[in-house]
Amino acid sequence: MSRNFYLTTPIYYVNDVPHIGHAYTTLAADVLARYRRIMGDRVFFLTGTDEHGQKVEKAANAAGETPLELADRVMKRFQLLWSKLGIEYTDFIRTTQERHKVGVSHIFSQLMAQGDIYLGEYEDWYCTPCETFWTETQLIDGKCPDCNRPVDKLKEESYFFRMSAFQQRLLDHIDANPDFIQPRSKRNEIVAFVKEGLRDLSVSRTTFNWGIPVPDNEKHIIYVWFDALSNYITALGYPDKEGNFKDFWPVDVHLIGKDILRFHAVYWPTFLMAAGLPLPKKVFAHGWWTVEGQKMSKSLQNVVEPNMLIDRYGVDAVRYFLLREVPFGLDGDFSHSALVNRINSDLANDLGNLLSRSTAMINKYFGGTLPNCGELTPLDGAYRDKSVEMLKSVDTLMSELAFSKALQSIWEVISAGNKYIDETAPWTLAKDPAQAERLGTVMYCLAESQRLVYSVLAAFMPATSAKGLGYLGIATAPDEAALVWGRLAAGTTIIKAEALFPRIEEKAD
Ligand code: ME8
């Protein structure tokens, strides 16, 4: 049944250039968006850039640019990468856009008018890289507990959001909605954090200028996280509650990295409660990538640049690797050798080989015309059932955001195909004219199973899927109706496939 599906990535800071961490979240969102579209949903996929705040202001000063010049330059790099990575987003929001600023001012004014935002005074420690306040007791050895960098003492007049008033409602909501925060281990961390007690949150700054001013008190700038989180509704046209907002809010899933879970699972829901808006259906925090065993950082000069990976290995290999290598929700390690291994074993050997072998045989034995499917033997039936069951398990796994497991279940069908060839030994059948129909059935099953494989792969590896389907005589993009056994028509022209993924012989560095 067709429905509306709204998903988001974080909006990325423009003081940093995109790396595989950013690419990972956006890619996962794209795969989910593509899958939901195949299944007939009307999808709104939002990404964008977070362009305000002290961090961006400082980076711009250091680069000798205005913050907006910096934002214009860096956001283009994000957009170029997304296009190169095959990301099909619906909208790209920038927090410097008028539509966003209008929406943020509106929410802020509403909460002020209600008394949920009030003027007070702040004295605490501030970590600029994390844009986060800490109390004395939260510091570890006098440094930021998140990033271990030095913090500054700030005393200033500040607007506060009455977050403390929402503590119990938030706990009740988490309790009543077991899927709200995922994975489960992260949900437990958030519950423990909230139970320790929510303090009112400082939501304005007077120490810098780059941001959205507090309505009617321009010397205050709205806290960058209040500003940024609101993007998820301003992009839907909020405060206009018609149109996209009506169709797509509450969001089906916010995809984020585990580093920003507290903002999404504590701050954001309480802002929404105060604004009288429904809460997100799900916040999913994925794990963190390290590189060759080490934290990715500019100072270590080990930041993995996605453009370089795509140029070297191809976009679909990178898409496959990032989602296959690590279960979504866990931490993982990136290495060139792991990527080369996946390309050689999963893509060249398993996936590519099966297609070349089967399409070569259909050409050799039937001149490239797909034969009729005769009666299925138990062996054929088992292969068909496995292919069909895979579609069901992929559907369940995608709803759990278990991308790696979904790929695993697709690959089980690919391995079953290679085994099926060995067991049916088509080259022996081909020697006996009395077995022509049997040989045809085997060829049909091979082609039809792979049609299903390449159809679901459209979500993960769009170009490879289109190529694979092309060899199998299908020129149209897959939809839900295509995901049934038996749709491939006898008589279809099957083209002998070239190697989809040539083996990489170079030694990985
Ligand atoms: O936090 N492994 O933006 P940001 C996996 N502007 N994912 C990673 C990663 C890594 N090593 N490094 C970064 C912000 N990410 C705010 C968000 S949302 C309203 C505002 C990904 O540019 C991951 O998704 O620092 C993480 O949450 C995000 O990049 C942080 O991006």
Image: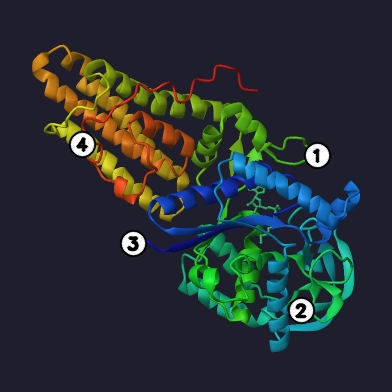
Where residue 493 appears, as percent x and y from the top left, is 29, 27
| Alpha carbon distance from label 2 to label 4 | 63 Å
Between tags 1 and 4, which lies in front?
4
For marks 1 and 3, the one nearer the N-term is 3
The label on residue 382 is 4
For marks 1 and 2, the one nearer the N-term is 2
Question: Mark 1: few, some, or many residues within 10 Å (few <14, many ≥20)?
Answer: few
For marks 1 and 4, the one nearer the N-term is 1
For marks 3 and 4, the one nearer the N-term is 3
Where residue 221 appears, as percent x and y from the top left, is 82, 71
Q: Is residue 83 above or below residue 431?
A: below
* Residue in the image at 63% along x and 76% along y: 239
Which amino acid, mark 1?
A: Ser
The label on residue 160 is 2
Which of the image's four quarters has the C terminus? top right
* Residue in the image at 49% along x and 73% along y: 175
* Residue corresponding to mark 3: 1
| Alpha carbon distance from label 3 to label 4 | 29 Å
Cβ–Cβ under 8 Å for marks 2 and 3: no
The label on residue 299 is 1
* Residue in the image at 27% along x and 35% along y: 448
Q: Is residue 78 above or below residue 239?
A: above
Between tags 3 and 4, which lies in front?
3
| Alpha carbon distance from label 1 to label 2 | 36 Å
